[in-house]
Image (spheres, rainbow, N blue to C red):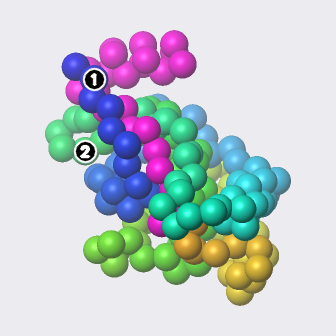
Amino acid sequence: MVDVYIKSFNELINMPLVIPEYQRVYTWNKEKIDKMIADFKEFLDLITYDEQQYYMGSILLHEKNQTFNIIDGQQRITSLLLLAIVLQFKTENNYEKPIFYNNVQSKKRIKQNYDHIKNRYENNSKLVSKDIFKKLCFTVIVTEDVDNAFTFFDTQ
């Protein structure tokens, strides 16, 4: 069975998300982060009404034991969490979600991107606003069958 939802950033990150061991390393670089933030700025500068949303694509999750393994979307989720942490954006329940990776390469890239975001964007509201987090929305696809999750991932 596959369930599909539209979720806000708050709703998504307040789910018990897990990055499984088999997930590829975190590879986003400074350029990818800067591009995402530039897109956010352009969107915020151009929106014409408060309810307008910024669509971040689909996230594929495998539900297991009341947690959700991220099958597709961990690069975006990780990068957004780094930005949220630097900008001190608090979720609805005022909880900062930590990012856990065991892979040394991922940890190194996360540290590099965190430092980049902190140095470039932390005190520069002209470049990025934490208001963007209230605008983000995702299509979240959830399955309890891991084979279905990977079949869906392979066909996307």
Amino acid, disc 1: Val
Amino acid, disc 2: Thr
| Left or right relative to 56: residue 116 | right
Residue 85 is labelled as none
Pointer 1 residue = 2
Residue 20, above or below 35: above
Residue 73, above or below 17: above
Secondary structure under the numbered disc 1 in the rendered image: strand
Secondary structure under the numbered disc 2 in the rendered image: strand
| Left or right relative to 136: residue 2 | left
Residue 147, position as x, y percentages in the image: 33, 15
> Between residues 15 and 47, which one lies in front from this camera angle?
47
Q: Nearer the viewer, mark 2 or mark 1?
A: 1
Magenta-tinted stretch:
133-156
Residue 14 visible in the shown view: yes
Name the quadrant of the C terminus.
top right
Residue 115, position as x, y percentages in the image: 71, 72
Pointer 2 residue = 67
Residue 1, above or below 134: above
Circles 2 and 1, Cβ within 8 Å, touching? The answer is no
